[in-house]
């Protein structure tokens, strides 16, 4: 086997094409767009290069056939906030071979070690955690846009190498056609009628305001859940917003206010993967026309929660129910939607899981985020203490 650095058009094309071969007969897999993968590794398009760097590799067998790929990357500000200097690896794809996987992990860990890093977290994205994050271990079904998908054997590849479970990510689904629990609606109606509370959906004409409101709530909410918290960069939100413009529906993105101060946000988007699965990772002219045609046919009958946050002093106040109440009114005007996938929540966040359960949602998928200790002298620590037992989560029939 031979490792090759991605450094020219030929090797980049091989990097991009490998998933097309590995998942050729898997109906659940959706090819990401080549341009999006390229953009993730373009310093002019990915704001995370401001404080970081990245490398990519492909693995060839003795016959010269590409059998694996991986990327390694880091951001100095995030690494400095952690108890151990950790970089990341992701965009991992590989045949079912422990030897091949180990070769890929070796080169990623080796490069990070050369940069002075002591641990490697993966599989993650070189960007925010709303997309391409974690190794799928439960729920091998069509994934929502941005959700990581992989073969079942990937779990063994990571764990056999020495990656340890950093945290679990749970995804919950809601069948819209089923009524919400009565108690949930009573709380939602109560909060919507309270004085000083208001709710607004996103509006492109006030994009700057809503971006700033998102940043404010996020930077208030997440420090309590992340020991290695780093404030979100508004530029990253603008980047995501621009990328999502073809599918974003403003009335599916809701913000809550108390005395006109932002206190919560829930961002939902149509599941574009229901269209993208027909495009094979390419946005040529024909596929652009196909996208418009399928969008008009309302092929997208699912939506996914991409992000959510509630200011700490308003958590458990009912404001979360109030936001979902507003979302439900919007969805009722769009009867083609049948299912909602709520944004993933970590095993360290029982409050959000309790909210999801209160809506009648069921546990549909689990992803694992792992960490590998490059420096064996430093003890491994979980991201946060695990507070949720997966075995007691409500399962449904997806």
Image (cartoon, grey):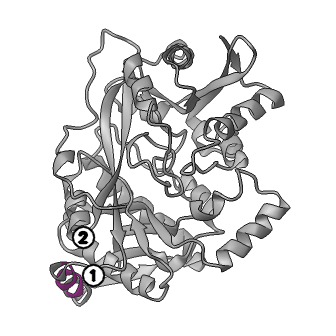
Check residue 60 for magenta coloring. no
- Left or right of 204: which side holds 16? right
| Front residue of this view, candidates 244 and 378 | 244
- Give the percent coordinates (x, y) of residue 56: 65, 26
Q: Quadrant of the N terminus?
A: top right
Check residue 185 for magenta coloring. yes
- Res 388 visible: no
Among the 4 quarters of the image, the one containing residue 22:
top right
Instruction: Residue under label 2, please give it.
Output: 360
Q: Which residues are magenta?
A: 184-189
- Left or right of 119: which side holds 242? right
Callout 2: SS? loop
Mark 1 vs 2: CB contact within 8 A: yes
Image disc number at residue 179:
1
Between the C-alphas of marks 1 and 2, the distance is: 8 Å
Image disc number at residue 382:
none
| Front residue of this view, candidates 25 and 382 | 25
- Left or right of 341: which side holds 347? left
| Front residue of this view, candidates 45 and 135 | 135
> How many residues crowd mark 2 within 10 Å: few (<14), some (14–19), many (20+)?
some
- Res 386 visible: yes
With respect to residue 50, does 177 lie above or below?
A: below
- Give the percent coordinates (x, y) of residue 106: 52, 14
Residue drawn at x 47%, y 77% is 337
> How many residues crowd mark 1 within 10 Å: few (<14), some (14–19), many (20+)?
few
Residue drawn at x 33%, y 76% is 324
Residue drawn at x 68%, y 15% is 61
């Amino acid at each position: 086997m031979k490792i090759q650095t991605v450094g020219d058009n030929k090797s980049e094309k091989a990097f991009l094409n490998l998933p097309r071969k590995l998942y050729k007969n898997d109906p659940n897999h959706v090819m990401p767009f080549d341009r999006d993968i390229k953009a993730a590794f373009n310093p002019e398009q990915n704001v995370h290069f401001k404080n970081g760097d990245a490398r990519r590799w492909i693995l060839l067998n003795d016959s010269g056939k590409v059998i694996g790929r991986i990327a390694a990357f880091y951001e100095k500000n995030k690494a400095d906030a952690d108890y151990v200097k950790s970089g990341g690896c992701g965009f991992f794809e590989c045949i079912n071979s422990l030897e091949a996987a180990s070769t890929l992990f070796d080169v990623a860990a080796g490069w990070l070690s050369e940069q002075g890093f002591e641990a490697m977290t993966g599989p993650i994205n070189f960007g925010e955690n709303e997309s391409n994050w974690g190794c799928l271990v439960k729920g091998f079904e069509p994934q929502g846009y941005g959700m990581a998908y992989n073969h079942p054997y990937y779990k063994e590849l990571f764990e056999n190498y020495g990656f340890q479970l950093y945290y679990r990510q749970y995804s919950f689904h809601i069948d819209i056609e089923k009524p919400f629990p009565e108690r949930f609606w009573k709380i939602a109606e109560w909060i919507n009628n309270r004085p000083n509370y208001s709710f607004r959906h996103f509006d492109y004409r006030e994009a700057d305001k809503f971006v700033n409101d998102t940043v404010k709530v996020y930077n208030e909410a997440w420090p309590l859940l992340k020991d290695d918290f780093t404030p979100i960069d508004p530029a990253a939100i603008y980047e995501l917003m621009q990328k999502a413009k073809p599918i974003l529906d403003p009335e599916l993105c809701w913000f809550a206010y108390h005395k006109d101060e932002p206190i919560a946000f829930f961002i939902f988007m149509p599941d574009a993967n229901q269209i993208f699965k027909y495009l094979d990772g390419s946005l040529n002219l024909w596929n652009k026309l196909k996208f418009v045609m399928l969008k008009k046919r309302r092929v997208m009958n699912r939506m996914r929660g991409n992000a959510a946050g509630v200011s700490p002093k308003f958590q458990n106040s009912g404001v979360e129910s109030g936001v979902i109440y507003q979302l439900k009114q919007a969805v009722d005007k769009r009867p083609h939607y049948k299912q909602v996938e709520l944004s993933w929540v970590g095993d360290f966040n029982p409050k959000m899981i309790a909210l999801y359960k209160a809506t009648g949602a069921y546990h549909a998928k689990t992803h694992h985020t792992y960490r590998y200790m490059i420096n064996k002298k430093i003890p491994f620590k979980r991201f946060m203490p695990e507070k949720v037992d997966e075995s007691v989560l409500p399962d449904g029939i997806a």
